[in-house]
Image (cartoon, coloured by chain):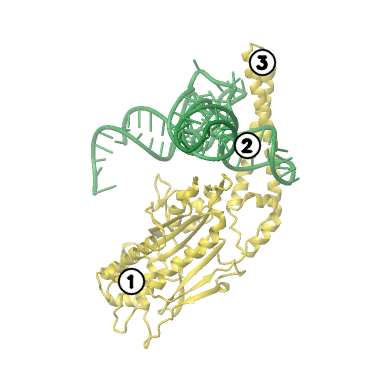
Amino acid sequence: MLDPRLLRADLENTARQLARRGFVLDTSSIAAMEERRKRIQTDTQQLQAERNVNAKAVGQAKAKGQDAAALLAESVRISERLKQLEAELATVQAEVEDVALGIPNLPHNSVPEGKDEKENQECRRWGEPRKFDYMPKDHVDIGAALGTLDFDTAAKIAGARFAVMQGSLARLHRALIQFMLDLHTRAHGYTEVYVPYMVNAASLRGTGQLPKFEQDLFALKGEHNYYLIPTAEVPVTNIVRDTIVESERMPLRYVCHTPCFRSEAGSYGKDTRGMIRQHQFEKVELVQIVSAEKSYQAHEELTGHAEKVLQLLELPYRVMVLCTGDMGFSAAKTYDLEVWLPGQQKFREISSCSNFEDFQARRMQARWRNPGTGKPELVHTINGSGLAVGRTLVAILENYQERDGRVRIPTVLRTYMQGQEYL
RNA sequence: GGAGAGAUGGCCGAGCUGGUCGAAGGCGCACCCCUGCUAAGGGUGUAUACGCCAAAAGCGUAUCGAGGGUUCGAAUCCCUCUCUCUCCGCCA
């Protein structure tokens, strides 16, 4: 959520900044709504003050044994008018809230302007895509040949966009998770956390998935209104919802492995082959809770932590800064890491690292106590995949394939695979 | 699933026979005074959000788990929900 003061005092400028990311803010209707809110709120508060004064007078009169009939009559009159005004105020405040919750974050100044993913800009590249002296296969064919990756069985058990893995492939998948967690906890200073995989609506509202993107989520039926998490970002970031973090605990750095569940509504026909886009996938997520003045530095560092995983796995990648039009709803700035997939002859997203500034924090009421002022201030939240495990597995299969159908296991993973060299 | 207890400020904890309660007291914290070290003592202050205001000051409003109700007036009474704890049952 944006600072509501922007909508009150700096509406035109806010609209201009939102226009950069292709969001049209209806300034005249918001201005009118705000005008109404202000008027009703002022009137209500004034009347509430009158009621309080009057009620106090009644109490004092009664205590002294005086007749309070006139005061009581006045109180009744005020209360009736107040009931009506308070109802109006609640309505208009809910209206303002609805509008505010639907407005995306302002893009940071350093974000290039653009309409869609075609206008994202490459920041840097790492590694050299391997030259094959044969036509490299994609991970679906590689997995099928190994007999360890099976989409048909998954379709029988569940449906489309699921996978079944067996044997050493399933083990490599698990090894990747251990490797990533170990790296981030030992080398990058993150604290490992374990969290619920189902969350309530308040948490999803906090990180920005609700109310606007409910169609992307799996919701549970029954008496619990739970949703399956689409990313660990939701439970992990919400650790600090409705809390004031003491300054000596800052910054908070969490790493968390969870499964992620996404309905992928609206992506029909996209990436239907293989395990690039699944309803269920594993991800190791990095989350940082930092102060405002440190958030952009922390964002760069976190992106570097995700890159380190690819570097140690020796997978070629490039770093893209997303343009204003391609960024997610809550983000102020996003870097995507794209790994090279020989099977597609393309770079594909494997991590997305975003700075949300105080956008999520305001929704969550997540603050820290600034020792300089002694006052609570909104934190900045940052997160990134470090990495998407399924896609990392795909990248390994395709980049490490051999002509004979075997797949070499990256050196850093061998200790997790009992020294095994090939799948 | 059954029976009970509870949720108050950064923390602990009164208040809960409705009015003077944004809330006693303590701890913690900050500043000041005293004390030539140490220890102890005294004083003052110490929530958040919002509104009016260019801003500060100030004034006002709301908030005692959440929501609703009763009442002229609710931390206090009633209802619903959420969460926590204890006991029993069941269970990985």
Closer to the chain start, of discs 1 and 3, is: 3
Quadrant, the C terminus of chain A: bottom left
The residue that mark 3 highlights is: A68
Chain letter for the green part? B
Give the residue type that dot 1 points to. Val
Q: Is residue A315 visible?
A: yes
The answer to which quarter of the image holds residue B43 is: top right
- Reply above or below: A7 against A280: above
Between residues A230 and A188, which one lies in front from this camera angle?
A188
State how far apart marks 1 and 3 are (Cα): 84 Å
Q: Residues within 10 Å of mark 3 (few under 14, many from 20)?
A: some
Do marks 1 and 3 both belong to one polypeptide chain? Answer: yes
Compute the Cα span from label 2 to label 3: 28 Å
The earlier-in-sequence mark between 2 and 3 is 3
Q: Is residue A180 left or right of residue A354?
A: left
Q: Chain of mark 3?
A: A
* SS type, badge 1: helix
Residue at 63%, 49% (x, y): give it: A4
Identify the residue shown where x is 67% and y is 16%: A69
> What residue did someone put label 1 on?
A412
2 or 3: mark nearer the eye: 3
Amino acid type, mark 3: Ala
Q: Residues within 10 Å of mark 2 (few under 14, many from 20)?
A: few
Tell which circle, 2 or 1, labels the residue nearer the N-terminal end.
2
